[in-house]
Amino acid sequence: MQHTHLTRDDVDLFLDDEGSEVSRRLFLHLLAVCPECYKAGGAILEAYLVGDLKLDFDGLDAMFALTRAEALASVDKLMAKASRAPAMAGAWDALAKAQALFDGGSRDEATLKKILGLLAQGLYALSFNLGGGS
Ligand SMILES: [Zn+2]
């Protein structure tokens, strides 16, 4: 059992459930103590540690923290490869708008959909321009 770590699919399943505060605390503890499990969902722990998530977080908030961290990590990787391509301006623009909306703090459904749409648009444009792949 000590070698059966969380996968990203496990994290998605966990976030789909209502869950109790105890289960969320155990989940965060696991992310904190196990580096392998941390790889699957560490962004959720980070969001909790900086106060973006409270212990009563719901799955959508946590999923958003995770998706955002993964998107930003992809952007960092792509940025290194693509910084000299002027055709990328639209992609950077979409990602910057998503960041600004997120930092605006509004978490209503319409805003979340807009942010996810902008992230998808920006990442799609980046991966398309780079010939696909992450
Ligand atoms: Zn583990």
Image (tube, helix red, strand yellow):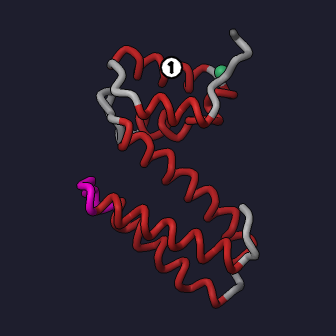
Q: Is residue 76 magenta?
A: no
Q: Is the magenta stretch mostly helix, strand or loop?
A: loop
* Residue 104 as seen in the image, left or right of residue 127: left
Is residue 71 toward the left or the right of residue 18 in the image? right
- Say if 19 sits above or below 51 in the image: above
List the single residue furthest toward the bottom: 86
x and y percentages locating residue 80 in the rendered image: 72, 69
Q: In which quarter of the image is the N terminus?
A: top right
Type of amino acid under label 1:
His
Res 47 quadrant in image: top left
Q: In which quarter of the image is residue 102?
A: bottom left
Where's ligand 1: which quadrant? Answer: top right
Please report the residue visible at 35 percent of the width from the left and 61 percent of the height from the top.
Answer: 113
User: Camera-side residue: 86 or 122?
Assistant: 122
Stretch of the chain drawn in magenta: 103-110
Up the image or down, 2 lies above or below 21; here it is above
Q: Which residue is drawn at 23% across and 55% down?
A: 108
- Residue 130 on image: x %, y %: 73, 76
Instruction: Kindly identify which residue carries mark 1.
Output: 29
Q: How crowded is mark 1: few (under 14 residues within 10 Å), some or many (20 or more)?
A: few
Residue at the spot x=57%, y=52% of the render? 70
- In depth, the one of 47 and 58 nearer the eye is 58
Residue 59: x percent and y percent?
A: 38, 37
Res 25 quadrant in image: top left
* Residue drawn at 49 percent across, 54 percent down: 68
